[in-house]
Amino acid sequence: MLTMNETLKVIHNRRSIRAYKSEQITDSELQQILDAALMAPNAVNQQKWHFTVIQDKGLLDRMVNTIKENILNSGNEFLKQRASAPDYHTFYHAPTVILISADEKAPLIQIDCGLAAQNITLAAESLNIGSCIIASSAFLFASEKGSQFKKELGIPEGYNHICTIALGYKAGENPAAPPRNKDVINYVK
């Protein structure tokens, strides 16, 4: 069996974490994670992304309430069922959330932000910090309250939500990795 270097170990160990301790991550850890985000590859080095770090529990709770309200009015039965659960919390009670937004007109921006999100999760894992990429947070902007939140969160004009990443110290063990389908690879040599 091949031995893995540290980078490959981090990639193989990273999981979506959905249970966090209430203790806040340190400013030093947060800065390392954000620096990793900025190092992500991006089309023609355009860097048309924006990272909003939210650690204010009251603001996070207000965001969750609005997301839940908008999901319940969305008509999406799967999400409505999840949001109706008594313990529903979009960010799984993580003490830190990074909201990624981007210039809606920038080419390939979805890929750029996906690469930055991956760097965030891998940097977090390397620091033994749990993470979970969340797309349903887009519902924050699905009503009139959305423009108020954009201002409050400092999202630049012309930028739209891409995803959020919940971050915090893991409250339990890493879940096992689900089996991976290796039939999705073919070789042309």
Image (cartoon, grey):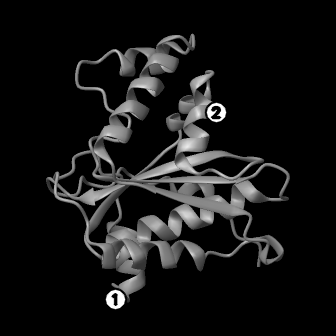
For the residue pair 36 and 65, the one nearer the viewer reads as 65
Give the residue type at disc 2.
Ser
- Name the residue that disc number 1 marks: 3
Horizontal side of residue 60 vs 158, given as left or right: left
Relative to 57, residue 97 above or below: below
Answer whether residue 2 is visible to the viewer in this image.
no
Q: Secondary structure at mark 1?
A: loop
Residues under labels 1 and 2: Cα distance?
A: 50 Å
Mark 2 Cα shell of 10 Å, populated few (<14), some (14-19), many (≥20): some
Answer whether residue 51 is visible to the viewer in this image.
yes
Rendering quarter of residue 7: bottom left
Horizontal side of residue 71 vs 105, given as left or right: left
Mark 1 Cα shell of 10 Å, populated few (<14), some (14-19), many (≥20): few
Tell me what residue is drawn at x 31 percent, y 73 percent. 27
Horizontal side of residue 169 vs 11, given as left or right: left
Q: Secondary structure at mark 2?
A: helix
Tell me what residue is drawn at x 56 percent, y 60 percent. 51
Residue 65 is situated, as x and y percent measured from the top left of the image, at 39, 25
Give the residue type at disc 1.
Thr
Relative to 63, residue 113 above or below: below
Horizontal side of residue 155 vs 9, given as left or right: right
Disc number at residue 39?
A: none
Residue 129 is situated, as x and y percent measured from the top left of the image, at 28, 66
Nearer the observer: mark 1 or 2; the answer is 2
Quarter occupied by the N terminus: bottom left
- Name the residue that disc number 2 marks: 147
Tell me what residue is drawn at x 62 percent, y 50 percent. 155
Quarter occupied by the C terminus: bottom right
